[in-house]
C-alpha cells in the first residue's frame, strides 16, 4: 500500500469515456490506495449489474470477539460501498466530483457467520434519474442508497445512506 499523508488528496483515476465504466479491478486497486482502510476490509470481488453494485467479502478481517461479524466493520463497509456506488455512477456519467456521506444508519438483523456479499442500490427506483437531473441543473446533488448484507440466503444487515455530491471545485 502507498503511504498517505494527512491533508493531501490522493490522485484520481482518469475518467472513463462518457457512458463507459471503470474496470472493477482497476477501481479496487485505486480504492485500496486512496482509502487505506479499504484494503483491510476483506473485499474479494466487485461487480455492477444495472443499478446494483455488489462486493463479495471474506469475514475473517471483520471478526469480533464472538467469532461473527463485528458491527463497526460491517457499518464501515456499508458506508464505503455507498460511497463507491455514487462515485462510480458519477464517473460513468462524466463527472469528476467529491462524494461525502451525509447520513447513514444500519439495522443488524442476524449474525454474520461466514463470507458474505454486500449489495447497494438506489433507495428509489428513480434515484439515478433524479441525481442526473440535479447534477445537470445545479451541479451538485444527493442520492439515498440502500445496502444489504447477505450471508448465504440470510439478510443480516440493512443500511441506508444519504450521499452528497459536492459542487465542482475551482482553482
Image: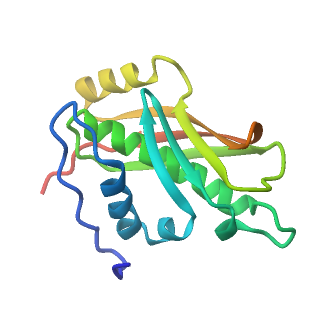
Residue 71 sits in quarter: bottom right
Q: Position of residue 10 (x, y in %)?
A: 28, 68
Direction from residue 63 to residue 100 in the image, left or right: left
Query: In the image, is 18 to the left or to the right of 66?
Result: left
- 168 relative position to 37: left or right: left
Q: Residue at x 87, y 68 (%)?
A: 66
Can you see residue 165? no
Residue 159 x/y as whole percent? 66, 41
Way the structure is coloured:
rainbow
Image spot of residue 101 (x, y percent): 49, 48
Question: In the figure, 123 relative to 24: above or below?
Answer: above
Asked if residue 34 is positioned above or below residue 85 in the image, the reply reads below
Q: In percent of the image, x 29 and y 74: which residue is there?
A: 8
Residue drawn where x is 36% and y is 49% of the image: 24
Of the 4 image quadrants, the one containing the C terminus is bottom left
Query: Which quadrant would residue 86 be assigned to in this image?
Result: top left
| Of 51 and 72, the residue lying toward us | 51
Residue 4 in picture, x, y percent from top left: 35, 79
The answer to whether 60 is drawn above or below residue 144 in the figure is below
Spot the residue most to the left. 171
In this rendered view, identify the residue nearer to me: 67 or 139: 67
Question: Which image quarter holds the N terminus?
Answer: bottom left
Residue found at x 33% / y 74%:
7
Amino acid at each position: 500500500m502507498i503511504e498517505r499523508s494527512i491533508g493531501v488528496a490522493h490522485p484520481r483515476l482518469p475518467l472513463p469515456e462518457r457512458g463507459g465504466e471503470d474496470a472493477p479491478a482497476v477501481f479496487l486497486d485505486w480504492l485500496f490506495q486512496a482509502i487505506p482502510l479499504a484494503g483491510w476490509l476483506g473485499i474479494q470481488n466487485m461487480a455492477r449489474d444495472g443499478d446494483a453494485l455488489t462486493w463479495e467479502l471474506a469475514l475473517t478481517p471483520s471478526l469480533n470477539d464472538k467469532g461473527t461479524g463485528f458491527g463497526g466493520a460491517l457499518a464501515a463497509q456499508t458506508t464505503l460501498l455507498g460511497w463507491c456506488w455514487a462515485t462510480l455512477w458519477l464517473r460513468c456519467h462524466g463527472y469528476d466530483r467529491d462524494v461525502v456521506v451525509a447520513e447513514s444508519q444500519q439495522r443488524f438483523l442476524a449474525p454474520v457467520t461466514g463470507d458474505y456479499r454486500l449489495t447497494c442500490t438506489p433507495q428509489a427506483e428513480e434515484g439515478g434519474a433524479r441525481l442526473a437531473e440535479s447534477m445537470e441543473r445545479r451541479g451538485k446533488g444527493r442520492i439515498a442508497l440502500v445496502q444489504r448484507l447477505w450471508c448465504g440466503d440470510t439478510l443480516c444487515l440493512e443500511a441506508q445512506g444519504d450521499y452528497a455530491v459536492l459542487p465542482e471545485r475551482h482553482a
